[in-house]
Image (cartoon, rainbow, N blue to C red):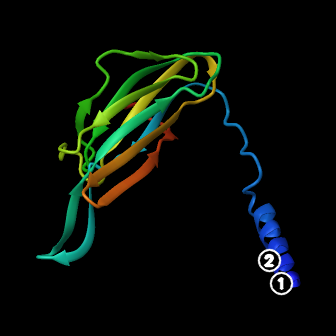
Amino acid sequence: MKLLRLLCLIFAALSFALSGAGQAEEAPALSRGQTLYLPIYSSFWHGDMKNGYPQKSQVSALVSVRNTDPRQSIRLTSARYYDTAGRLVAEYMKAPKTIGPLATYELYVEKQEAAGGSGANFLIVWQAEAPTNPPVVEAVHADLLGHRTLVFITSGHPINPGKAD
C-alpha cells in the first residue's frame, strides 16, 4: 500500500512538472496602447430544444479594466458595446478615464439588457504615455436566482483595429 501511495505521489509530481502548471508565465510585452476585444454574453442559449429553440437566459456582466502597472497610469478612451450582428449598441465612455497604477475601472451591463445577445462584445481602447504593462480586461457574467447560480468569466484579447478606430 505504501508503494502504491508513493507511486501516485511521484506520478502526480511528474504530471504537475511536465504540464508547466508550476512555471511562471512570460511577461507580456510593454505597450503604449491597444484595442481589446472582450466577448460579452447578455444572453445565452442552453437546455433542450422546445418549439424549435433551446431555453434563453439573460445575465448581467461586470466589465473590469485592471491597470496592472505598479508605476504608471493608463487612459481608457473608448468602450464600445456591439450586438451579435456587429452593430454598435452603446459607447460606455462619455469621456476618457484615467486609471491609476494598480487601480480598476468597472463598467456594468444590466441583466435586463437584451440588445447585445449571445454574441455581444466590447471594443475597449486604452493608451499610455510611455510603454507600460497592458491591463487585464475581464467580464464576470452572473445570474443568481433561487437555488440556481450561474457565474462565468470572459477575457479581453488584443486585436488590430484597422482603420475603424
* Residue in view at x 67 percent, y 36 percent: 28
- Whether pointer 2 and pointer 1 mark residues with C-beta atoms closer than 8 Å, the reply is yes
Q: Which residue is mark 1?
A: 4
Q: Nearer the viewer, residue 95 or 63?
A: 63
In the displayed structure, 77 sits above or below 2; it is above
> Could one spot residue 86 in this view of the protein?
yes
Q: What amino acid is at disc 1? A: Leu
In the displayed structure, 35 sits above or below 2; it is above
* Residue in view at x 44 percent, y 48 percent: 154
Report how far apart the C-alphas of labels 2 and 1 lie in the structure: 6 Å
In the displayed structure, 131 sits above or below 88; it is above
User: Residue 129 lies in what quarter of the image?
Assistant: top right
In the image, is 29 to the left or to the right of 13? left
In the displayed structure, 13 sits above or below 80; it is below
Residue farthest to the front, as pictured: 1
Quadrant where the C terminus sits is: top left
Residue farthest to the right, as pictured: 3
Residue 46 point in image, percent of width and height: 28, 67
Assess disc 2: are there few (<14), some (14-19) or many (≥20) residues with their C-alpha within 10 Å of its C-alpha.
Answer: few
Assess disc 1: are there few (<14), some (14-19) or many (≥20) residues with their C-alpha within 10 Å of its C-alpha.
Answer: few
Q: Which residue is mark 2?
A: 8
